[in-house]
Image: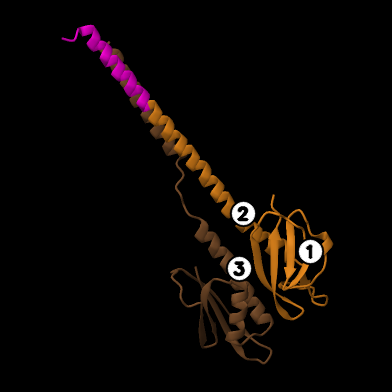
Chain colours: A brown, B orange
Amino acid sequence: MKNKGIIFTIDGIIALTFIALFSMILFVPTYDNTKEIEKILINNRISDLLITAQLLEIENSNILEQKFQLLLEDKSGFIIINNKKIEINNSHEKTRLISQNIRYINSSNKEIYIEIGVYY
Amino acid sequence: MISAKSKKGQIIIIDILLFLIIILLIISIQTKIIRNYKENLSFQEKEINFLKEDFLIENYLLDCNYLGYLDKDTKKCYKNKIEIKNIDKIDYSIFCKLKINENIIFYIENKNNKKIYKRAAVFEDKFTILEVEFCEK
């Protein structure tokens, strides 16, 4: 009779071991891809702004700021055109930054440098 | 004084109860793990979908076979420069709304709220916001 009791307990322990192995196989670490996806989406929009700024020869930071806000509505960031930097939606609490820049010669043979950064 | 038989009976009952408790514990842990696994998969699928849809805009809609501007002289394709052409060739099972600034190019009413994607482009030498909405499947 005592042996039967022990057998039940041993069965329980074996079952627990099985579940531990089962959970190890099925356990998927909750890696948050959201930030990576957001980074790619933001990157595409920054490229759009840079390319359109070059095509339209936008040299005014305030005009580019308006375009930034149309495209990236609630995002904060900055724009640098040549040496002039302006911050957009300054009160950001986010710590990650993504930025891209281009340098080109415009139709007036003037070198233009544009950098756009977005905090996310 | 408890007889030996009754003592053994008590031990058996305790063992059975212990066993049942362990089984219930196992079942609840298994259910939780499987549910978590399924939720994770569906969340990841949703995230990848955002990327797929953005990719589709870039490589399908903005391609020169559709809205991308093709310079007739140089035969160069400008992805961020668009012109309204080949609208009838666009797959309406994928895209439900296409808006260029305030002008709605096409719109198929869809009661479900879907994410709106905005891209910037040049249209008729002006800065343009291209708004695209995908059809809910």
Give SS at disc 2: helix
Magenta stretch: helix, strand or loop mostly: helix
Asked if disc 1 and disc 3 are in contact, CB closer than 8 Å, the reply is no
Q: Which mark is residue B106?
A: 1
- Residue B76 in magenta stretch: no
**Residue type, mark 3 in image:** Asn
**Residue type, mark 2 in image:** Asn
**Residue type, mark 1 in image:** Phe
Foreground: disc 3 or disc 2: 2
Q: Which mark is residue B49?
A: 2
Q: Which residue occupies the foreground of this view, B108 or A82?
A: B108
Residue at mark 1: chain: B
Residue at mark 3: chain: A
Q: What span is colored magenta in the figure? A: B1-22
Q: CA distance from mark 2 to mark 1?
A: 23 Å
Give SS at disc 3: helix
Residue B16: image location, x then y, percent:
33, 19
Residue A18 visible within the image: no
Residue at mark 2: chain: B
Q: Are marks 3 and 2 on the same chain?
A: no
- Residue highlighted by disc 3: A44
Which corner quadrant holds the N terminus of chain B? Answer: top left
